[in-house]
Structures are given as structure tokens and as C-alpha cells.
Image (cartoon, grey):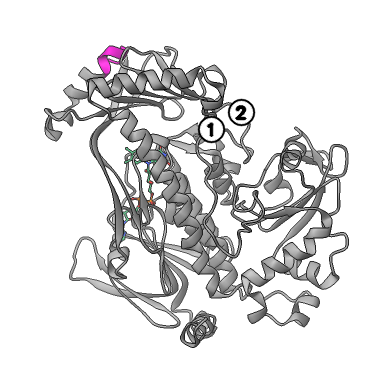
Amino acid sequence: MSNSTRTQRSAENRPSAADDPEVADFLIVGAGPVGLVTAILLGRTGKRVTVVERWPARYPLPRACTIDHEALRILQSAGVMGSHADLFEPSRGERGGYQIRNGDGELLRAINWNRPSESGWANTNGFYQPDLEEALESMALALPTVELRRGWSAVGLEQDDETVTLTVASTDDRTQTTALRGRWLVGADGANSVIRDLVGIATADSGFEADWLVVDYRPLDDRPWGAFVTQYCDPAQPATAVNSGPGRRRFEFMRPTDVSADVMAQPETAWCLMEPWGVTPETARLERHAVYTFRARWATEWRRRRVLLAGDSAHLMPPFLGQGLCSGLRDASALAWRLSMIESGLADAAVLDSYGAERGAHVTEIIDEAVAIGQMVCEQDPQKAADRDARLVSDLHDPDAAVVEPPHPRLGRSPFVDPNDPSSGHLSVQGQVAVDGTIGLYDDVVGGGWQLTGIDVDPLVGVPRETAAWFASIGGTSVTVSAAGALRDVEGAYRAWFDARDCSVVLARPDFYVVGTGEPRDVARLLEGLRNALGAERSRPRQLIEEGATP
Ligand SMILES: Cc1cc2nc3c(=O)[nH]c(=O)nc-3n(C[C@H](O)[C@H](O)[C@H](O)COP(=O)(O)OP(=O)(O)OC[C@H]3O[C@@H](n4cnc5c(N)ncnc54)[C@H](O)[C@@H]3O)c2cc1C
């Protein structure tokens, strides 16, 4: 590490601006789902958060309509699932799953979404984005630590070693400006991010581009729906059908080259395209229709000093895998534990370098997969489409080629990912547990945060007292799960997860990714490795940890 980097990092940890009531701990630009979840996760730690949103009212229309199990576990950690689980319709049973069909409706590929997920929630779930955003906003506003300033647009930004100063202009009257100060700033301001431009972060583009009409409607009858998501790979008219949450459905249609975007956006076009599926003004109510240009683009950096990007400002992908918002919520979760630990003196600001390294590699792998599916679905050449169909049909009968789940990439290289442990950097497990007659998901019953879990073993046996005290001081929990003990593995999810990895202990992060696995004899090494990666020693003397002092 260079001297100048060292100087910058120690200055980042200086507490002076932290004591200034005029300086928020965190400024967040953008009250979309990613900005709001980041605000809730940070606000729940007691930190002061100011969210700036350019529009005076919430955006009333959906973009995302499916969400995966990991994203629901993140929403669970933000307190959303306790009160709003009914917003989500799980993909289960005979209508579960993702199918790819050809122009004649024949099955080309089936992805089984009905297997249990690692996260304790259904693999994929339909939902209505405006309802989720309403819930998130009311939860954020209920926190005494979170302030939301609607009707203000970020227009300028300066930063020094301790703070970021954000200039915002009234959206109604751009001549009216004011300055806000914060210790850190998260740019969650969407695909055309002003924050990204203001700090000079460039984007890379895959070159994928396709216009699609998105039609949301409410069925007026209760006819059976096919798979949860179906891609119709018809070269004459590529289309997607999605179960988009309780009581709602979505169709998406690619714009043919000889049809203008204006014609595509007409309601008559939407009705005409849905008619072959029997969706007509007599059987459905149109909620909205709009033409989107699907692209694949990502930020080349995720951090400039005290400014970080999250959500669509950092990555954009075609929605064929339903992973754009899910990826943004991963950003929120990955940022929240880092930022709150830094501001509590439990981690060095250098841990933010691992944010972009981990998230960048993870999301670009998902973008590549979304583009690959997009290219397959968008094929308009009849001969190439026929070749594709033949290839997929032969894969369909080959069990080794059958795809069973959406992609689960590994986090990119970082001090928190052990390249020699194949589980490290992948998702940990959450299942139902029972304690004292209460049954619930592990994070609700035991608690989120840093989790040390042993199956049939006490993970802390043999760990030096001081190391165990340090782990407790960062909010770590340590428990034993077993088939019949005090914390019961109700459905065997833990037994199956540990057996598949041939280990008895796992150390997992607050964003649910595995730090490391092993046996009880490995735990002291895992915890000391974590302590080193957090750089906590630079911020907190050992005797304070031993005395159990909180920062
Ligand atoms: C058709 C379609 C289907 C999709 N389907 C799925 C799906 O099924 N599953 C999935 O996971 N994802 C899906 N996505 C992607 C998903 O919708 C986005 O990834 C997600 O909404 C991004 O959230 P965000 O909070 O990052 O950005 P946004 O929702 O864009 O929010 C950014 C906010 O920042 C505000 N803002 C912008 N500039 C400023 C400024 N200068 N000052 C202040 N505020 C500002 C904006 O007004 C906005 O409120 C889909 C996208 C599309 C278009």
C-alpha cells in the first residue's frame, strides 16, 4: 500500500465530520428500490441517512416483475418480509418454472424453479414494483434516522477526505439550489446516473440492443396460466409471458425492424399482439404499455473515494433473466454492512475496495448470461432459429444439458473470498429452525449479521476467548443446528447443505455470502482471517474488545 493511500484511508476513518449534526452519515441519490433498501438497511443501524429523489411523487409503473430468493432474503433483512410477504407470488407447483418454446409453441428448454432455494424463499416470485416501492418508502420514512427529500435533483458534487458535498436543485425551479453534506454518498440514481457522470466513472457496453414493447394487464378471467415465465422464440415475433405478481400478468414483444417504436407503443398494437393468447379487451384490463430499449452496460469502477454506485447506475441488463433489480439489491446489501461497519469503527475504509471487485465480477457474469439468452430469444433469421431449436430439443433429452436453476456466480476476488474454498463467495443457506417452540427462518430466529453456524458441533469450541469476544463485538452470532437439539433443523436444509459441502461449520457474512467453511478446528483461522480482512485492528484496540465495549 502506498503512503498516499494510507494517508487517505486513515483520514477516511477520522471522526470529526461524524460528530457534526449538519453532516449526514450517508447521502443516497435516488429513491428507487435500490436507494430505498440501502437507506433502510443503513437507517436500521442507527446511522443518519438523507435520500434525495428528483421526482415529487413515486413512479407509478412497474419495470421489474420477478424477484429471486436471494433478493427476498435481503428484503427480509430490511424487515420487509415480516409485514409485506403477501406482495410476492412464489413460482411453485405445476405452474412454476421458466420455459423456452419455439414459434409453434413446442418446448425447447425447461428450467425447474421448484427445487428449494438456499435462501429459504421460493426461487422466483412475481410482484408489482409500485406496491413494493410504496412499502419500502413507508418503511424508510418510519425510521427516525432516515430523511427523504423528494423534488430535488442532484446536480453537483465535491468531496474531500472527510465529506461529500452534494448540490441539489429543485426539480420545479432549477435556479433554486441547496447543498447537503454527508460522510459517504451512494449513487442509486438509475441507468442515466448523474452521480456516475459527476465523478467521471465510465461505462462499458456489450453492444446488445433491442426494442421491446412491455404490456402489463390484469386478467378478468381465471384461465390457467402456463409456466411462470415463458420465452416464445418465434423468429416472426419473439415474445415473453410472465406471471407478474398477485392478479397481474405481463407480455413483452420484440419490435420488428419494419415497425416503428411509435406504432409499437399504440394500445391497438398491444391488443393485436396479445390476441393469439386470448387476451382481449373482453378478458383483460390493460394497465400500461411502453417500449423499452434493452441494453447491457456496466460501470468500469464502483467507487470514487467517498462516492459509491449501486443498482442500475452500476449495471444494466436485458430483463430475460429477471436479474436487474435482484443485482441492485445485492449491491445494497453488500454496501450496507461495509458502510455501517466503517462508520462504527469496526472496519477500515479499505473494505470498500472489495465492494466493486466482488460485485463487478458477479454482475458481469449475470449480464453475459442475460445477453446470451436475449440473443437466443431475439433471433429473427428463420434458418438460424430452426438450427437453435434443433440444438435445444436435443439438449432437452440430455439430462446433463438440462438447466435447473438461474445462474449463481461466485463473487469476484477479494480478501473476503478464499479461492481455495469452493463454497467461499457463494450463497450460504437459510432454512426453517425451531427454538423453544418457535419455528421460523434462521435470520428471524437467530439474527442476521455475521453468522457462524455448526451442524451438530459448537463452532466456537477451541476458539481463543479473545477471538470469540471480537466476533461477538462485531455482532457475530454462533449457534449449533441439529436434528433434535436446542436449535432444530426443521426441514433438514442445514443437514443437506453441510453434507453437500462435506463440512460442519460455515462462517457467513451479513449479505449471506460464505466467508469460509470447515471443521471446528478451522474456526479460529476463519475468524482471524475475517478480522484481518476487515482491518478492524486499525480502528479498535484489543483491550476494548476483550472488555466487550461497543463503539
Ligand atoms: C421492462 C423491464 C423489466 C424488468 N424486469 C425485471 C425483473 O423481472 N426482475 C429484476 O430483478 N429486474 C428487472 N428489471 C430491472 C429493474 O427494473 C431495475 O434494475 C430496477 O428497477 C433498478 O432500480 P434502481 O433503484 O437501481 O433504479 P431506478 O428504479 O431507476 O431508480 C433510480 C431513482 O433515481 C432517481 N434519480 C435519477 N437521477 C436523479 C438525480 N439526478 N437526482 C435525484 N434523483 C435522481 C430517479 O428518479 C429514480 O427514482 C426490469 C427492467 C425493465 C425495464
Q: Where on the picture, by quarter, is residue 308?
A: bottom left
Q: Residue at x 68, y 80 (%)?
A: 540
Q: Residue at x 37, y 18 (%)?
A: 390
The residue to which callout 2 is attached is 115
From the viewer's side, name the closer residue of 518 and 214. 518
Residue 49 at x, y percent in the picture: 47, 66
| Mark 1 burial class by Cα count in 10 Å: few <14, some 14-19, many 20+ | some
Residue at 24% over, 65% down: 170
Magenta stretch in the rendered image: 274-282
Q: Is residue 496 visible?
A: yes
The amino acid type found where label 2 is placed reads Arg
Q: Secondary structure at mark 1?
A: loop
Question: Camera-side residue: 272 or 42?
Answer: 272
Q: Secondary structure at mark 2?
A: loop
Mark 1 close to ligand 1, CB under 8 Å = no
Mark 1, residue position:
405
Q: Which mark is residue 492?
A: none
Q: Is residue 32 magenta?
A: no
Q: Nearer the viewer, residue 118 or 401?
A: 401
Residue 66: x and y in percent read: 44, 35
Quarter assignment of residue 73: top right
> Can residue 219 be seen from the camera position used here?
no
Q: Is residue 412 above or below residue 22?
A: above
Circle 1: residue type: Glu
Contact check, label 2 and label 1, Cβ < 8 Å: yes
Which residue corresponds to the image point at 85% horizontal and 70% vertical from the top-left?
465
Residue 483 lies left or right of residue 166; in this view the side is right
Q: Residues within 10 Å of mark 2 (few under 14, many from 20)?
A: some
